[in-house]
Image (cartoon, rainbow, N blue to C red):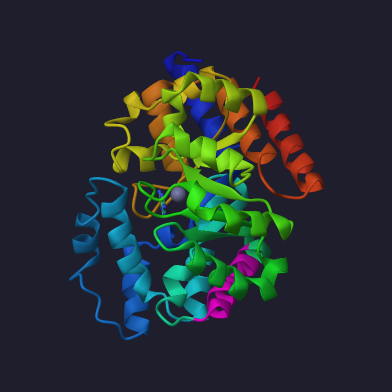
Amino acid sequence: MATSASTDDAALAFALACPKAELHVHIEGTLEPELAFALAQRNDIDFPYASTDALRAAYDFSDLQSFLDLYYACADVLRCEADFHDLMLAYLRRAHRDGIVHAEIFFDPQTHTARGIGFETVLNGLEAGAATAQAECGISSRLILCFLRHLSEEDGFATLAQAEPYLARIHGFGLDSSERGHPPVKFERLFARCRALGKPVVAHAGEEGPPDYIYQALDLLGVSRIDHGVRASEDPALLERLAREQIALTVCPLSNVRLRVFPQMAMHTLPQLIGAGLKITLNSDDPAYFGGYLGDNIRAVQAAFGWDAKTWYGLARNSLEASFADESDKAAWIERLDRAYAELR
Ligand code: ADE
Ligand code: ZN
């Protein structure tokens, strides 16, 4: 898996340029300080930071909750369709530069509807931004509605009722926010309803929470992917199951370091997870807050582990295979990836 310096550079260049999917990114987590200030001004909001530098200085997180407190506060600048449009367009333009051909993007409607913003305002704006980006650079995207797990299952059901008229525009459902103390079992009935609607479901599990939350996400929620899942490395039987069933994990390395799941990149268990045969994908989570987009995650991982092109090819292939895109699109992207890999060799 590890290489010499020159093949290392070639592997990095391949990893950055090859076609790939991003399967774990929160659109609210792509809000850069510059855009936050511009939207605060446009919406005449008194933003509680003096400058973009002052806001960036607050990005010193001790754990998931310390990040979420700031993330929800900053989302207050998102008020009208144009704001959601601009946010989505900025992310997808940036993603395109990292070789991303398809992105599956989480949005948190409860963060907005609780502030009196209409569900349709959020959805229309995000979709319009995605359409602009698709026309501009051909990038494909899908929306995954995430329920906030610190809220009740009843609140989740109310959000699902708001979403039901728009189901054709929502590709799947997920579970995010404060993990500890909010196990997947809390949402068992809600996720059964989402699955009955014919939608794929995913859940954050094993980011800060124990391996048991990963078992619950699989067995009680029926997820087709696990978001994060890095604490699976503590449970050999779980590792064996995830490898056997080829359940994709959407791992977010810079996020894990910034939220102190691992003290530094070199201590990340990615090599162990890949070595155990798991279907690993790399993602950015909340790139505006965690020091970078997918390309930055790739650079940071390569600096720590120096993988060869075959490993990077495998990760890109996993991301395309594990996506919820149409099979014909997936096949076309995988063919492009295979060609790029063949040319390298
Ligand atoms: N919402 C946004 N980012 C998140 C993360 N890393 N974990 C849980 N919920 C989130
Ligand atoms: Zn996440």
| Residue 177, above or below 279 | below
| Residue 201, above or below 344 | below
Nearest the viewer among 344 and 253 is 253
Nearest the viewer among 336 and 201 is 201
Residue lying at 52% horizontally and 59% vertically, measured from the top left: 146
Nearest the viewer among 219 and 88 is 219
| Residue 214, above or below 284 | above
Does 58 appear in magenta? no
Horizontally, is 11 left or right of 230 in the view?
right
Image quadrant containing the C terminus: top right
Main SS class of the magenta portion in the image = helix
Quadrant of the rendered image containing residue 78: bottom left
Residue 164: x %, y % from top left: 67, 71
Horizontally, is 166 left or right of 292 in the view?
right
- The answer, for residue 139, to whether it is visible in the render is no
- The answer, for residue 80, to whether it is visible in the render is yes
Horizontally, is 263 left or right of 237 in the view?
left
Residue lying at 37% horizontally and 52% vertically, measured from the top left: 178
Quadrant of the rendered image containing residue 51: bottom left
Residue 328: x %, y % from top left: 82, 46
Nearest the viewer among 323 and 311 is 323
The stretch of residues the image draws in magenta is 118-133
Quadrant of the rendered image containing residue 123: bottom right
Residue lying at 58% horizontally and 20% vertically, measured from the top left: 277
| Residue 88, above or below 20 | below
Residue 119: x %, y % from top left: 54, 77
